[in-house]
């Protein structure tokens, strides 16, 4: 896109075209994930992703690729992901026993963080062979994933035949609002990400504060993923068994402290340590929140709840970057990062007061059952 337009705004619009379908289709995709076969939904969405990347490959081969084509493909990818995310999240409790769900979520998180670390580097190497090769390899990966999901053993049954009305479509949001444990964990994570979006300012920190080159920025970008990967591997081997509410609040507080430390640091190594700590503490919160959401939610509502949860988290990521940019413009980069960290710690204190049931939560298992 940048080669075609030489516009930073155009790059931003690509992200917007991918995010808007998730926001606009929230109610629909949650209903679909609860009413139809989740495995087949994942198969269809990944096939759609493969064909979308194929369009980009064709455009590059024929030299017909354009900005509008990229926007269209971004919207198609965003739409496919909007349908896939709730189905993909809601299917997991149907595949593993309840007592192994936390480990499964940690294992999936490990795979995701490995992709975050290795994916860009591998993509850069493949790009040396040309953009068409990169598109084709990406399309092939989507097809392989599609085939794996197609042969996945999954017994589908429709557990609810409630009429499709606005009350049914809003069921996920209503359920989250009525369940203090889910509402507290989801909103805590959302506001922590919203206020602690220091990673959005990494290019400025690397250049103006740490005075490092592109290699230093690369290390800084990898540091949170490394921390998250190490913690996810640990949690997969040693799952949390008690005091999960207190641990979640402590992890978010550490996230805030790590953000402040990163803001105060003028040393590359110390900054990397702070970001590793930030990523690892965030992973603790993610695993606890994800497990609680899945175990507290009835199976016939997991799609709608997962869709609503995805919007909360996706919105906080986008708005968090916006918040960091605005506060950096108003107060400067270092004060903006520190304000975000202090705000995160303040949210922890407020949420502990507002959601005592989450503080008292002992295990990840549904304690009401």
Image (cartoon, rainbow, N blue to C red):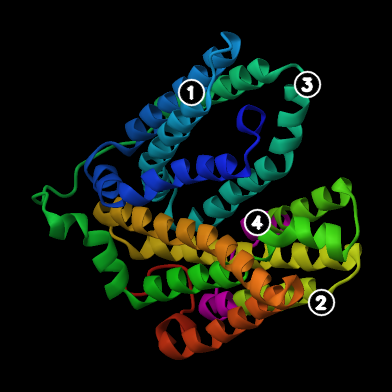
Nearest to the eye among marks 1 and 2: give it.
Answer: 2
Q: How would you classify the magenta stretch by its main secondary structure?
A: helix
Above or below 194: residue 227: above
- In the image, is residue 54 above or below residue 1? above
Q: Is residue 128 magenta?
A: no
Q: Quadrant of the C terminus?
A: bottom left
Callout 4: SS? helix
| Foreground label between 4 and 2 | 2
- Marks 4 and 2 close (CB-CB < 8 Å): no
**Which portion, as a residue range, is magenta?**
230-249
- The CA distance from mark 4 to mark 2 is 27 Å
Could you tell which of marks 3 and 1 lies nearer the N-terminus?
A: 1
Which residue was labeled with disc 2? Answer: 264
For marks 3 and 1, give the CA distance.
Answer: 21 Å
Query: Closer to the camera: disc 4 or disc 3?
Result: 3
**Image location (x, y in percent) of residue 204:** 77, 60
The residue where tag 3 is placed is 128
Q: Residue at x 44, y 68 (%)?
A: 186
The label shown at residue 232 is 4
Nearer the camera: disc 3 or disc 1: 3
């Amino acid at each position: 896109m940048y080669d075609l337009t030489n516009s930073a705004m155009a790059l931003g619009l690509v992200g917007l075209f991918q995010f808007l379908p998730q926001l606009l289709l929230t109610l629909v995709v949650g209903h679909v994930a609860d009413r139809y076969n989740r495995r087949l939904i994942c198969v269809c969405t990944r096939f759609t992703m493969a064909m979308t990347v194929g369009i980009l490959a064709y455009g590059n081969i024929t030299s017909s690729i354009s900005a509008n084509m990229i926007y269209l493909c971004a919207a198609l990818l965003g739409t496919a992901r909007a349908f896939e995310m709730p189905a993909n999240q809601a299917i997991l409790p149907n595949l593993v026993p309840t007592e192994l769900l936390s480990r499964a979520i940690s294992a999936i998180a490990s795979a995701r963080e490995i992709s975050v670390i290795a994916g860009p580097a591998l993509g850069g190497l493949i790009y040396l062979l040309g953009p068409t090769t990169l598109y084709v390899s990406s399309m092939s990966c989507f097809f392989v994933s599609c085939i794996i999901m197609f042969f996945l053993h999954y017994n589908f049954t429709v557990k609810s035949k409630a009429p499709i009305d606005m009350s049914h479509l809003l069921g996920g949001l209503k359920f989250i609002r009525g369940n203090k444990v889910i509402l507290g964990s989801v909103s805590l994570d959302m506001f922590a990400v919203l206020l602690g979006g220091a990673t959005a300012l990494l290019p400025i920190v690397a250049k103006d504060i740490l005075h490092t080159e592109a290699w230093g920025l690369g290390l800084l970008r990898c540091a949170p993923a490394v921390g998250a990967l190490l913690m996810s591997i640990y949690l997969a081997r040693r799952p949390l068994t008690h005091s999960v509410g207190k641990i979640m609040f402590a992890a978010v507080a550490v996230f805030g402290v790590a953000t402040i430390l990163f803001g105060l640091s003028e040393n590359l190594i110390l900054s990397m340590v702070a970001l590793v700590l930030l990523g690892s503490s965030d992973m603790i919160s993610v695993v606890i929140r994800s497990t609680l959401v899945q175990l507290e939610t009835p199976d016939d509502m997991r799609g709608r709840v997962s869709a609503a949860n995805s919007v909360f988290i996706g919105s906080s990521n986008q708005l968090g970057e916006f918040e960091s940019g605005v506060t950096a413009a108003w107060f400067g980069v270092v004060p903006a990062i520190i304000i975000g960290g202090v705000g995160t710690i303040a949210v922890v204190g407020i949420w502990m007061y507002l959601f005592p049931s989450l503080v008292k939560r002992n295990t990840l298992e549904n304690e009401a059952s």
